[in-house]
Amino acid sequence: MKNKMYLLMVVFVGALLGGCAGNTPIERGIVSSPEVTITAEDKSFVLKPGQRFKTPFTSKRAIADMLDPRAPMVDGWKQILAKKQGKRVRVSVAGEENDFFGILVFGSVKDIKQCTGPALRSHSIAIPKMYVDAAKGGSVSVVYESFQCRGNKENFNWMLWMSDLNF
């Protein structure tokens, strides 16, 4: 009986550690929108347009695993902050009078061998004008870069929620 309990415990701990070991960080990126600069509110990093960067922080979990699939994606920032995985940022967009408030998260890739796409190698932060416009008037806009995994599951290598009003 003791041997069975010991074996069961070894299998459980191995499965637990094995599940954590499958997450891979994406180590670098670029802000590909030429008019966008992202600055951490705590001043720990500044991501400038056209400049390559080393990912300033990475969640230990995949972003899709932290979001409630039943909740609107635009409200996902609440779950990210509750799990202490995102950072508050300011988003400066050339031609806009004021900076935008934001929540930024860089996720890990779960089971990278099961996934495809260039987003697995590098972050490419692009914020199209339609998302900037959607973040005005107190609305929250969400923009992200995604990749596909086996079973056609969509995941995200980064995600940014932004608004012209603090949230």
Image: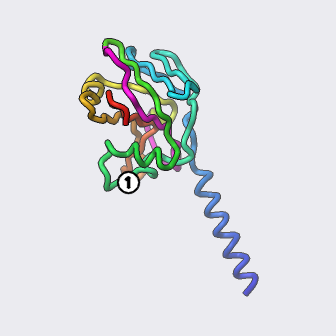
For the record, the magenta segment spans: 96-118
152 vs 17: above or below: above
> Does the segment drawn in magenta span residue 106?
yes
Q: Within 10 Å of the Cα at label 1, are there few (<14), some (14-19), or many (20+) other Cα atoms?
A: few
Q: Residue at x 58, y 26 (%)?
A: 44
> Does the segment drawn in magenta span residue 64?
no
Residue 138 position, x and y percent, is 27, 32
76 vs 117: above or below: below
Residue 24: quarter of image: top right
Q: Residue at x 42, y 49 (%)?
A: 79
Residue lying furthest top:
95
Q: Amino acid at mark 1?
A: Asp
Q: Residue at x 75, y 84 (%)?
A: 2
Disc 1 designates what residue? 68
**Is 97 placed left or right of 90 in the picture?**
left
**Is 44 placed left or right of 151 in the picture?**
right
**Is 153 placed left or right of 8 in the picture?**
left
Q: Nearer the viewer, residue 9 or 103?
A: 103
